[in-house]
Amino acid sequence: MATLSLLYFARVREAIGLDGEAVDVPADVTTVADLAAWLAARGSGYADAFADLTRLRAAIDDRFVALDAPIAGAREVALFPPVTGG
């Protein structure tokens, strides 16, 4: 297991009730999508936050990534809804 710092923003943070946490990620969790699925299994707030992966964006160590991006070697993963400007 590797410890990973997670940051949550907007509706993800609201659903979970945390702005971040450190987690020990199992070895079989290898991508951002795997991470979201693993987190969703942790309880109802997490399940709500990660129910629709099409409404999720991620950044690994401050770089935007696709959900199929590997998390190996990452120190921090940020999870948030799509961002719009105006």
Image (spheres, rainbow, N blue to C red):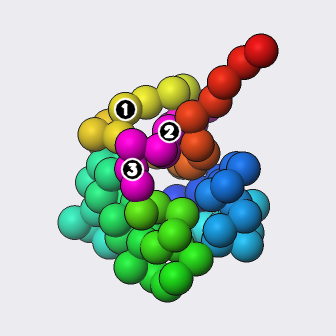
Q: CA distance from mark 2 to mark 1?
A: 7 Å
Judge depth for marks 1 and 3 and give the one in front. 3
Which quadrant of the rendered structure holds the N terminus? Answer: bottom left
Local secondary structure at mark 3: helix
Please tell me whether residue 51 is drawn above or below residue 9 in the rendered image.
below
Q: Identify residue type, mark 1.
A: Ala
Return the x and y of residue 5 as percentages of the image width and height.
60, 58
Q: CA distance from mark 1 to mark 3?
A: 11 Å
Q: Identify which residue is drawn at 50% across, 39% down.
A: 57
Q: In the visual, does 67 lie left or right of 4?
A: left
Q: Evaluate if marks 2 and 1 touch, with contact meaning CB atoms under 8 Å apart.
A: no
Quick one: 3 or 28, which is closer to the camera?
Answer: 28
Residue identifier under label 2: 57
Return the x and y of residue 8 as percentages of the image width and height.
66, 55
The answer to whether residue 1 shows anywhere in this view is: no
Farthest top residue? 86
Disc with the residue nearer the chain's start (2 vs 1): 2
Residue identifier under label 3: 53
Farthest left residue? 28
Return the x and y of residue 84 as percentages of the image width and height.
66, 24
Q: Identify residue type, mark 2.
A: Arg
Quick one: 21 or 9, which is closer to the camera?
Answer: 9
Q: Identify residue type, mark 3.
A: Leu
Q: Is residue 43 magenta?
A: no
Return the x and y of residue 70 as percentages of the image width and height.
31, 42
Residue identifier under label 1: 66
Q: Which mark is residue 78?
A: none
Local secondary structure at mark 1: loop
